[in-house]
């Protein structure tokens, strides 16, 4: 008699059923994790990402295709720039790392670039951990090109691949992010830098898990190296970005995520998200998992257009944004909000209800005052017009 399946094996089997027969899993990356952590209350995204569902294909099958994806030109430009930065054994990249993060260290004259190839993501993650330990013990500069890191997310491992990790002579580890947006006069677009910092914070968390397993534990730098093209050229420029805030926020949000097995256990039997299913069945499957839509999802999730349409159809106040939702307390629909403002719904002692009614009164008074002003202006214009007519008539009589 075969031994019973372990909990992890049962979960993987269940997630494969949700994904669909013979549908390969789509691996989570740091960008998806940063977006997932930004909206931890969305059970729909948690289960879809945990099961490895291709949300872009799913959105297309639902009739709400997303506009996600990098243009081919941007992709090729980014790859060409990264290759330039890492040329000659990463000499320029290591020079920038020393210049921005470790000016007192010895120059990276003979840096090590270990081979990280292995079979599968688990094998590559193990090979990366071994290379990090060997580099830390050996001292000197080491460049890990596209290492593989593992991070547990909602009870399931996610494999992440940063652009590079630098090991300093003192044993410190630094995450490197290489982006193709320009750095003009030493500064880049703050919004793009912020997105890169959130993505790098995920890598820092994963690297910390590897560092904690060493004896003694290795140190992971809280500043990451952001490398971008200088001005409008293809020459690299770098900046040290402190990601302590982003790391703390991401850690807290990931810890708050509902465990994937809890969501999977709550779904009806037969639910499947395979994109080749009939649209009606696929829609029913997606709607069986609660979603928490906010306008920020439009820049972070492939299913945002579908969820936005459903949120608007239901009149959910979350479609107005997190700040508005937070101010409205227990009022969860636009209909409830309007009824509370008219005095037809809600507890008058509720601060949100009281604020809505006060705002409704102020609006009514403002509109009434405006109507009175318009009416008064109309009467004044009529009198003025009558005066002008009388003057014209008098002038005609005088002639």
Image (spheres, rainbow, N blue to C red):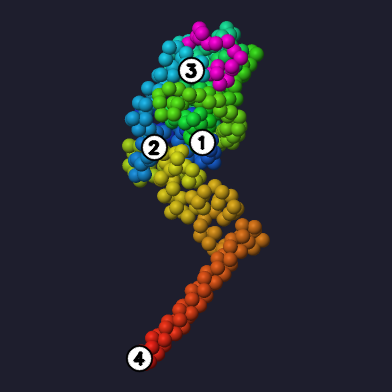
Name the element at disc 2. loop
Whole-angstrom CA distance, mark 2 to mark 1, is: 21 Å
For disc 4, the marked residue is 399
- What's the magenta region? 97-113
For disc 2, the marked residue is 68
Q: Give yes or no for contact between labels 4 and 3 (Cβ–Cβ under 8 Å).
A: no
Name the element at disc 4. loop
For disc 1, the marked residue is 190
Residue 273 vertical position relative to residue 134 in the rendered view, above or below: below
Q: Position of residue 58 (x, y in %)?
A: 38, 38
Query: Which-is-in-front pick, marks 3 and 2?
Result: 3
Say if residue 34 shows up in the picture: no
Q: Position of residue 161 (x, y in %)?
A: 47, 22
Q: Which mark is residue 93?
A: 3
Q: Give yes or no for contact between labels 4 and 1 (Cβ–Cβ under 8 Å).
A: no
Q: Position of residue 362 (x, y in %)?
A: 58, 66
Q: 10 Å neighbourhood of mark 3: few (<14), some, or many (≥20)? A: many
**Which quadrant: the C terminus?**
bottom left
Q: Earlier in the sequence, mark 4 or mark 2?
A: 2
């Amino acid at each position: 008699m075969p031994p019973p399946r372990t909990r992890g094996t049962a979960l993987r089997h269940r997630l494969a059923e949700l994904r669909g027969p013979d549908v390969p899993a789509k691996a989570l990356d740091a960008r998806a994790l940063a977006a997932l952590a930004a909206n931890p209350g969305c059970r729909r995204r948690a289960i879809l990402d945990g099961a490895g569902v291709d949300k872009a294909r799913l959105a297309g099958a639902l009739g709400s295709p997303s506009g996600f994806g990098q243009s081919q030109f941007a992709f090729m430009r980014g790859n060409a720039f990264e290759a330039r930065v890492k040329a000659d054994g990463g000499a320029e990249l290591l020079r920038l790392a020393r210049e921005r993060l470790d000016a007192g260290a010895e120059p990276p004259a003979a840096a090590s670039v270990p081979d990280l190839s292995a079979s599968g993501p688990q094998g590559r993650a193990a090979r990366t951990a071994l290379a990090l330990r060997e580099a830390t013990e050996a001292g000197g500069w080491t460049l890990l090109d596209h290492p593989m890191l593992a991070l547990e997310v909602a009870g399931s491992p996610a494999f992440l691949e940063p652009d590079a990790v630098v090991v300093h002579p003192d044993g410190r580890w630094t995450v490197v992010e290489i982006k193709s947006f320009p750095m003009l006069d030493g500064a880049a677009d703050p919004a793009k830098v912020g997105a890169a910092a959130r993505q790098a914070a995920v890598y820092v968390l994963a690297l910390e898990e590897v560092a904690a397993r060493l004896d003694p534990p290795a140190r992971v730098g809280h500043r990451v190296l952001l490398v971008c093209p200088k001005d409008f050229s293809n020459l690299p420029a770098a900046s040290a970005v402190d990601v302590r805030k982003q790391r703390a926020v991401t850690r807290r949000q990931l810890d708050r995520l509902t465990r994937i097995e809890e969501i999977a256990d709550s779904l009806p039997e037969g639910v499947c998200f395979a994109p080749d299913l009939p649209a009606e069945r696929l829609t029913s499957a997606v709607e069986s998992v609660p979603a928490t839509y906010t306008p920020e999802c439009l820049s972070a999730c492939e299913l945002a257009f579908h969820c936005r349409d459903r949120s608007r159809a239901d009149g959910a106040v979350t479609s107005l944004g997190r700040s508005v939702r937070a101010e409205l307390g227990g009022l969860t629909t636009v209909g409830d909000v309007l009824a509370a403002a008219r005095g037809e719904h809600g507890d008058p002692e509720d601060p949100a209800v009281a604020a809505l009614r006060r705002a409704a009164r102020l609006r009514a008074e403002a509109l009434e005052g405006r109507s009175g002003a318009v009416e008064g202006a109309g009467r004044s214009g009529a009198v003025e017009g009558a005066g002008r007519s009388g003057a014209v008539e008098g002038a005609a009589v005088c002639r």
